[in-house]
Image (cartoon, helix red, strand yellow):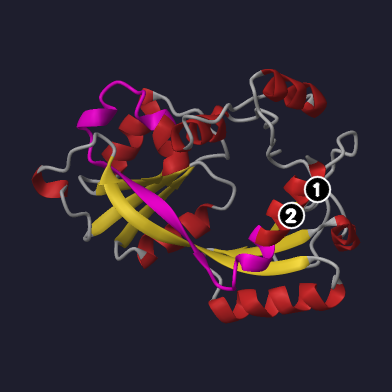
Amino acid sequence: VARGYGRDELLLHREWTPAVPVVADPDRPGGVEEAKRMGATVVVLDDGFQHRRLAREVDVVLVAAEEGLPGALLPRGPFREPLAALRRAHAIVVTRKSETEAGARGLADRLRGRFPGAVTSAVHLAPGTLRPLSGTGTGAHSVPGGPVTVLTAVARPETVEASVREAGCTVRGLEAFPDHHEFSAADLARVLDRSSGDAIVVTEKDAVKLRELPGAAASPVWVLEQRLIWDSDPAPLLDLIARRIREGS
């Protein structure tokens, strides 16, 4: 169940887990009721830590190591609540993309010391497989290891660029659009023109929108998938979730 802002994330969830109902509703309790009517016995609420109208069995809060803590609150910064709000969390997961493992572990240790009641772990969102948007890799762009242009519409485009470099690509250009931007055929044409024939690398979040555009399938666009690597033992977190679900049922 998600608010539904930005259809890209909903499309991704439906693609990743086609057998699981995905509900979009800005009224989260209404979304949960809809999920129940669809047969759900467990509901995963995307980005719902501040929704106090819902009683949760477990609150898992993800903290990006690249953001730095403590950070400024909206509208000056990205955070909705002060750091002390993590006292409500049952689990805290430090994620990293461009941050080093040592840096992420250091942040996890700080949070573990300040919030000892929460299970704290760390994960690395690492680059995975590069696959062509069209589903086939042919011609001069079949192995995009040389110069590429990164095209993205996410909140932190620099982390996408770092991930593409980590995947072994030489990045010659970055075309960053606002988060959740709905790409048009004109957007793609301009980027292709400025890339001077380089392959274009995008995230899965961007790919679900780009592939709908006329001519996209014939363009040298590649999708960089992500894989999740645990930097700490996942067992305590997974055991916590399983236990709380059993207790809630």
Magenta region = 209-238
Q: Where 196 falls versus 122 (above or below)?
A: above
The answer to whether residue 200 is left or right of residue 117 is left
At 59% across and 30% down in the image, what residue appears?
Answer: 6
Residue 243: mark: 2
User: Which residue sits at x=85%, y=62%?
Assistant: 83
Q: Which residue is mark 1?
A: 247
Q: Is residue 235 magenta?
A: yes
Name the quadrant of the N terminus.
top right
Amino acid found under the numbered disc labelled 1? Glu
Locate residue 173 relative to residue 102 in the image: left or right: left
Residue under the image location 35 percent in, 23 percent down: 213
Answer whether labels 2 and 1 touch (C-beta < 8 Å). yes
Q: Residues within 10 Å of mark 2 (few under 14, many from 20)?
A: few
Visible residue check, residue 25:
no
Q: Nearer the viewer, residue 238 or 162?
A: 238
Horizontal placement of 74 versus 25: left or right? Answer: right
Residue 223, image quadrant = top left
Residue 200 in percent (x, y) is at 30, 45
x, y (%) of residue 60? 73, 54
